[in-house]
Image (cartoon, rainbow, N blue to C red):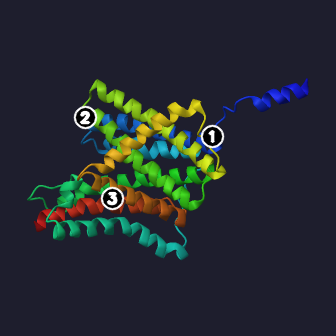
Amino acid sequence: MSRFATAVRAFRPDRSLPSEATELGRIGLFLACLTVTSAVSYWVALRLLGVPVAGTLASPNVAGLAVPSLVYARYRGVPPSFGFPERARLADVAATVLAPALAVVALSVVFAVGFDASLAALLGWTYHPEASVVTAAVQAAEDVVLTGVGFGLLVAVAFDLASSRVGLAPVRAVVAATALATFFHSVLRDAAFTLVVFPKPWRVTVLGLLLVATVCGCVAVGVTYRSAAERSLRHVSRPALAPVFAFGLLGAVALGTAFADVPGGVKHVLWALAFGLAAFGYHRSKSVWVPAAAMALFWLSIRLVAFVELAAF
């Protein structure tokens, strides 16, 4: 009887997912939840504009991003390190923190000199012609800090999950964290904010499809990764996974559409570069303050470039 049971189990189709697919699917679900919390917090923040403390705590970068990321990281047992980098890593840290901002400045010069165009206009930032430096700094300070904290934590948590839970090597974990943060910012968050500002029933449907595509896309990537590692089509050829890959393709198309947009794709390229450098900085320093500082300076550079271009042109 035991031999018969063993034979039956041998011919029974394997419906289990590879561990990489399971863990990446959980990360995809985490991003979907972040999208919902970001939308809700954005809706609340719009109604608390001007309220000193409550407005700040309800902002999408705090209540919608930083707090849920930290809670989920602790729940999964991979809380990010809040210690400071070692002295031996300070040169790497400085390069990582400054690189995204320097990239924005360099691209602004290229656009101004080579194309007689404004990078700030492409990125959607401008100031009143009579605005002062002090006014611009005060307006930008809070937003810059909250952006750095929120997205810095997201990058750190995504890297730790990809490294510890999925089991990726550091370089691949950096790539994974970059892709996850970019997809969240360029596709999910934009769709959620658009729904809050311009609520339409069809936008609810689109956002719902994107959330499903996020989870399915992460699972599909995990299955593909295991198949590539094993050099076998056993996992990807399972008919039951066809809908998963179909929804995952929808997510890939949405991301590709965001980057293919002209000239709006420039913004997404810069954010992807910033996320990549922030993830690499976290890998090298093991300190969440490094990606937070990198993202804060990156966002500050965009705001300042807008002010400088306004003064120059």
Q: Earlier in the sequence, mark 2 or mark 1?
A: 2
Name the one closer to the observer, 311 or 276. Answer: 276
Q: Residue at x 28, y 37 (%)?
A: 194
Q: Amino acid at mark 3?
A: Leu
Which mark is drawn over residue 197? Answer: 2
Disc 2 and disc 1: Cα gap in Å?
Answer: 42 Å
Name the one closer to the observer, 199 or 62. Answer: 199
Q: Which element is circle 3 on?
A: helix
Residue 178: where, in percent of width, then height? 45, 54
Crowd tier of the residue under label 1, counting other residues whose Cα lies within 10 Å: few below 14, some 14–19, many 20 or above: many
Disc 2 and disc 3: Cα gap in Å?
Answer: 24 Å
Crowd tier of the residue under label 3, counting other residues whose Cα lies within 10 Å: few below 14, some 14–19, many 20 or above: some
Q: Amino acid at mark 2?
A: Val
Name the one closer to the observer, 163 or 269. Answer: 269
Q: Residue 312's image quarter?
A: bottom left
Q: Earlier in the sequence, mark 3 or mark 1?
A: 1
Q: Which residue is mark 1?
A: 235
Q: Is residue 127 above or below residue 33?
A: below
Q: Residue 34's image quarter?
A: top left
Residue 313: where, in percent of width, then height? 10, 65
Q: Which residue is mark 3?
A: 270
